[in-house]
Image (tube, rainbow, N blue to C red):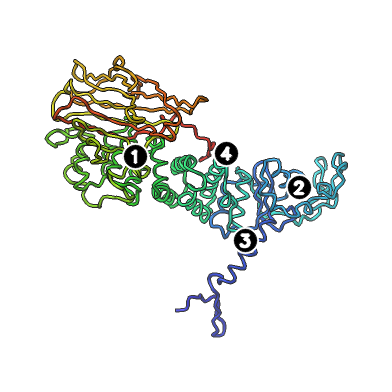
Amino acid sequence: CDERRVVAEWAGVYVYAAPYRNIMEDAEWKKGAKHLYREIYQETGSGDFGIQVAGGPLFRCHSSILQQAGGFIGKIRQFGKVLPREVDSYEVPAPKDYFKEHGYFHLLGDLQAIQFSQPIERSALGDPLQKLKNQNADPKKPGYTTAHFIGGTTTAIKRADPFFLAERYKVECDCERMAELLRFVYQGQMSFFDVRPETDRDREVLTQNMLCMCVDAEKYSIDRLYTKILYWFGNECYDIIGERCFADAFYHLQHFEVSVTEEFSRQMLVRTVTGEMLDGREEFRAVSRDPRWSSLPVDFVEDTLSYDGIPICSETEVLGLIERWNANADKKKDHIVRLLCCFRPDEETQQIFISWLTNMGWLMPDGSVPDVPELLGLRKIVNGGLKGKPPRRNVQDSGPLGAEEQGDDNDLMFIHYKGSSAVASGCSFSLGSQQRLLQAEPIRVSGLQRMRLVLSNPRVPLWDPEHEVFVGLSYGEGRYFGYLCSCTAFSGIFSVRALASAAPAPNAPAHLTGSGNKVEFDLALEVQVQRANMVVVCKLSVIFANLTVTEEHFQITYETLAYGPGLRFQVVTTGLGDEEVDVQLAWVGGGGPANDVEVNTGSVDFD
């Protein structure tokens, strides 16, 4: 079967025409389009399709080239405002002057010999003094007419205008971004891809430009550019713009999902944000430790936690991510149950999962689920509904003995010690006498950290008054600061007392509520920037129900923080004897509430 189609038949002779240009013709066409790009800035250009930015210059484009860019020309007609096809060069800002005024210096290289296309009185060849004088209209300029507002066009003479446009539209778009869109249409390139920022401000500007270009490429249906930008965000941008700007870009793109105009484009965006952008361990940590993690919609988090390539060391990290998403304890139970379906247990993690449910109060001592409407889906999970897909271990973990050396790759962050021996690592533990939990990765930089603790003893109905648990920070051998947690004489009321290695006795207690054998609260650590005397002030707060119960300040030296032992969260039990206390830990924030985070990349218009 001949792939060509018959277009005519005459005298028994068939004439064939290829439905598409061959490779050589296509290459020649693209080569010609690249040269034509610089013509769009010329007033004497050969373009027949005018795109004028509101308040900016006119781009004289070529409709035959714009039609090759998918639906771009149709979107210009859809979103643009129709303007008269005749252009008065005196009413439209000159590209060179406009670019200099707005700081678009990288676009000046495309304005080769543009002054020669200007009228003599506006070009560099004119007398500068003549520009200050009132001049009569040039009767020889293209489109000049003798029509007057009194006499109208009757008996008027009009010169031919060889630069008359077939169509002309005004679009509400940034001039620099429209120029880059047209550069990609003509040349298949965009200058922002070649930018390598050196300062934080440059990284913020590049991030803002790429986000806006992504919005514009989708809005104007330049699919090749949209795909290329998403690839840049998913595979290249972290090394270029850094961790903070990467996290900002992630959450901006997630917000952009609701404004995408095409379903196929939306699916591409979701795949990039929930998949490619989170393939690397560092990228995943930058996003999941951001306080905005708790603001993500449940559908988005479910897609992320269901991703087979999620960079985690163990399935227990999924429980920590769910806990961090519910940092403000404001999520619906049925939403949390949906996310628990993303957990893939095995023999090793099944018990941790059961302990997690027990500490949440969602599993009775006999293993049954309470008869609560929001927990109906949990029964299927407990009865084996999670079996199917294998657990994910996409990041190598050195285990408890080597977790301190490779703490950067262990998001669980805690090691269980019996005496001086490390026996386990994870997020859920049972602590006995002479045992402790220690953060694997020391804190060495200023910032905010927030950790949620659940202390319980489900084996007895009431907490033993002799059992006390120290939760706080260690910053060297025999040096610590934190709170001593114990029950009071009133059932379900617990006390926390500040305790430091430099103080002879605990401070006065502050109180919070729990149940008979369980208490849950958050520890928030604020590490300030070092002062002139190289002293670092730290603040440790106890937060219950999103309210600060108590807070205390302590000081360490900058040398201890940066080069010494650093700061490590730790949990130590006292007065247990042969009994045990269950401890569950979860990082619920790498830096303060979401509304305290300042996004410096500027506003991105998704409307």
What crowding class fits label 3: few (fewer than 14 Cα within 10 Å), some (14-19), or many (20 or more)? few
What crowding class fits label 1: few (fewer than 14 Cα within 10 Å), some (14-19), or many (20 or more)? some
- Which residue bears the numbered disc 1? 298
- Which residue bears the numbered disc 3? 64
Q: CA distance from mark 2 to mark 3?
A: 24 Å
Amino acid residing under circle 4: Arg
Which of the two marks, 1 or 4, is nearer to us in this view?
A: 4
Q: Secondary structure at mark 2?
A: loop
Q: CA distance from mark 1 to mark 4?
A: 33 Å
Snapshot quadrant of residue 591: top left
Front position in the image: 482 or 111: 482
Whether residue 52 is visible: yes
What crowding class fits label 4: few (fewer than 14 Cα within 10 Å), some (14-19), or many (20 or more)? few
Extreme-bottom residue of the structure: 12
Q: Please state the horizontal and vertical placement of residue 166, each as a whole percent of the image.
A: 67, 55
Amino acid residing under circle 2: Ser
Whether residue 291 is visible: no
Checking the image for residue 89, the label placed there is 2
Instruction: Tell me which label, 3 or 4, sits earlier in the chain.
Output: 3
Q: Please state the horizontal and vertical placement of residue 361, each as a whole percent of the image.
A: 21, 31
Q: Secondary structure at mark 1?
A: helix
Instruction: Tell me which label, 2 or 3, sits earlier in the chain.
Output: 3
Instruction: Tell me which label, 2 or 4, sits earlier in the chain.
Output: 2
Front position in the image: 20 or 102: 102
Front position in the image: 285 or 509: 509
Q: CA distance from mark 3 to mark 1?
A: 45 Å
| Mark 3 touches mark 4? (CB < 8 Å) | no
- Which residue bears the numbered disc 4? 201
